[in-house]
Image (spheres, rainbow, N blue to C red):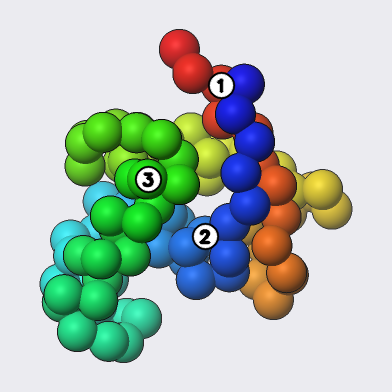
């Protein structure tokens, strides 16, 4: 099991990826440039120790099902929260 801290922005991006949003849709909703969103996705790949966009979307979908410490998935406004991702 891997433990990693996620910022509120990273959690927001993962929520959108889990819903199937495109990079352009994520950029429009979160602001910034397309390159910035792609760089953030690359950082998430490294942080989560996964190798492809497909794995990132799969991880986002699994994490969206997890509950935070207070019982709300990806609760807005919280500081970094450690989530666990079971490698299968």
In space, the residues marked 3 and 2 are separated at their CA atoms by 15 Å
Measuring 26% from the left and 33% from the top, which residue is drawn there? 51
Q: N-terminal of the two: label 1 or label 2?
A: 2
Residue 72 location (% of width, % of height): 73, 54
Residue 83 location (% of width, % of height): 66, 42
Q: N-terminal of the two: label 3 or label 1?
A: 3
Res 86 label: 1
Residue 4 location (% of width, % of height): 61, 44
Few, some or many residues within 10 Å of mark 1 (<14, 14–19, 20+): few
Measuring 21% from the left and 65% from the top, which residue is drawn there? 38
- Provide the residue designation for mark 3: 46
Q: Nearer the viewer, residue 49 or 28?
A: 49
Label 3 close to label 2 by CB (< 8 Å) = no
In space, the residues marked 3 and 1 are separated at their CA atoms by 16 Å
Q: With 73 as the anchor, is 27 left or right in this view?
A: left
Of tags 3 and 2, the one toward the viewer is 3
- Provide the residue designation for mark 2: 11
The quadrant the C terminus occupies is top left
Residue 31 position by quadrant: bottom left
């Amino acid at each position: 099991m891997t433990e990693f801290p996620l910022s509120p922005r990273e959690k927001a991006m993962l929520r959108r990826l889990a819903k199937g949003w495109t990079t352009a849709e994520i950029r429009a909703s979160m602001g910034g440039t397309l390159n910035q969103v792609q760089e953030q996705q690359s950082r998430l790949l490294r942080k989560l120790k996964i190798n492809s966009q497909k794995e990132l979307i799969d991880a986002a979908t699994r994490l969206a099902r997890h509950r935070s410490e207070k019982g709300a998935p990806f609760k807005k406004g919280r500081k970094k929260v450690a989530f666990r991702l079971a490698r299968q």
